[in-house]
Amino acid sequence: MNSGRRAVARAHANIALAKYWGKADDVHNVPAVTSVSVTLEALTTTTEVRFDPSLAVDRLELDGREAEGRALERVTALLDRVRRAASIETRARVASRNSFPTGSGLASSASGFAALAIAARSAAGLELDRDRASDLARRSSASAARSIHGGFVRLRAGEPGDAFLPAEPVAPASHWDLRVVVAVTTKGPKKVGSTEGMGHTARTSPYYPGWIALCQRLSAEVERAVLARDLRALGEAAEQSALAMHACAMAAGPALIYLEPSTLGCVHAVRAMRDRGVAAWATIDAGPHVKVLTTGGDAERVRQELASLPGVVDTIVSRVGGDATVELEEA
Ligand code: DP6
């Protein structure tokens, strides 16, 4: 029994350059499209897991506060998979912290489930196997599969019924010293979560088949541009992927609109910067914040311009982050 082991894992958030939006299989959480991401050094989740024989149920602390409900259920679902793999039944204490401001609305599920997958497997006495950890994280949130690896990462589209689908490294963080500037914008009404949003899009948007077809081309273009370190080609493909995803969601019935006025303000500012010769391309996930791909030389200028826009409440400049890591201690 490994009840005395405490594992602490750190994983970085990632931003998809070629977006995942749509599932081939809801039960096994298999993506319908291939996505390619960059791991963000500045946004980190640290998660501690300890299996504790005195517990009757799993316990979860998020940023210092006891969490229950849906958040705890999702953590227990992942822990149940680990318990089955390790042939144990012990419940666990999980404590997770984000380096980025809580409540900023910046997605934490990718780094959160990646850190949890790695920490839980180690605490249960399973070996550090990145493919298994990535596959485990994917079952909780597909974008989390990518946060197991640093640098640039691919998660392939799968087939219905696929039981094993880990993310794969495309290039390490050392391959390309890109910068990503995050513009945290004021929040609008409560957003629809990604899982629900992509399901609704797939069911009701007339553009969904077009989106699926486009993704095949864009994910290949993104990967080619990453390998060639071609920021213009990468930026153009990434911007099209993000805006096509949002166009597809906006054509759903009823419309799914994640973009706020401040979001569009950032996108227009990025395009205007480009006209002035600044290397800057925007991408947006299922929320109002904007992430801008740029170079080390232009990052501060991009950050300042974004920070001066109405509705932008914070800015973060990130380098490309490394692999998720874990430390194990015998308690
Ligand atoms: C817009 O990974 O959160 O951020 O697998 O249903 O948990 P589930 O979805 P999730 O979706 C992320 C969607 C996205 C694009 C991306 O990260 O590729």
Image (tube, grey):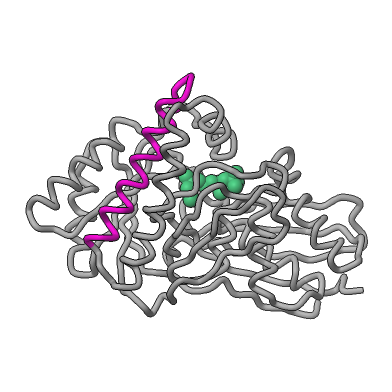
Q: Is residue 248 left or right of residue 21?
A: left
The quadrant in which the C terminus is found is: bottom right
Q: Is residue 100 left or right of residue 139?
A: left
Q: Position of residue 91 (x, y in %)?
A: 86, 57
**Residue nearest the observer in this picture, 115 or 57:** 115
The quadrant in which the N terminus is found is: bottom right
Q: Is residue 247 magenta?
A: yes
Residue at 69% over, 58% down = 95
In which quadrant of the rendered view does residue 132 lie?
Answer: bottom right
Q: Position of residue 152 (x, y in %)?
A: 43, 68
Residue at 55% over, 54% down = 157
Q: Position of residue 110 (x, y in %)?
A: 55, 55
- Whether residue 115 is visible, yes or no, is no
256 over 241 or under it: above or below: above
Question: Residue reaching furthest left?
Answer: 276
Q: Is residue 93 left or right of residue 207?
A: right
In which quadrant of the rendered view does residue 123 lie?
Answer: bottom right
**Residue nearest the observer in this picture, 64 or 297:** 297
Q: Is residue 130 left or right of residue 260?
A: right
220 over 159 or under it: above or below: below
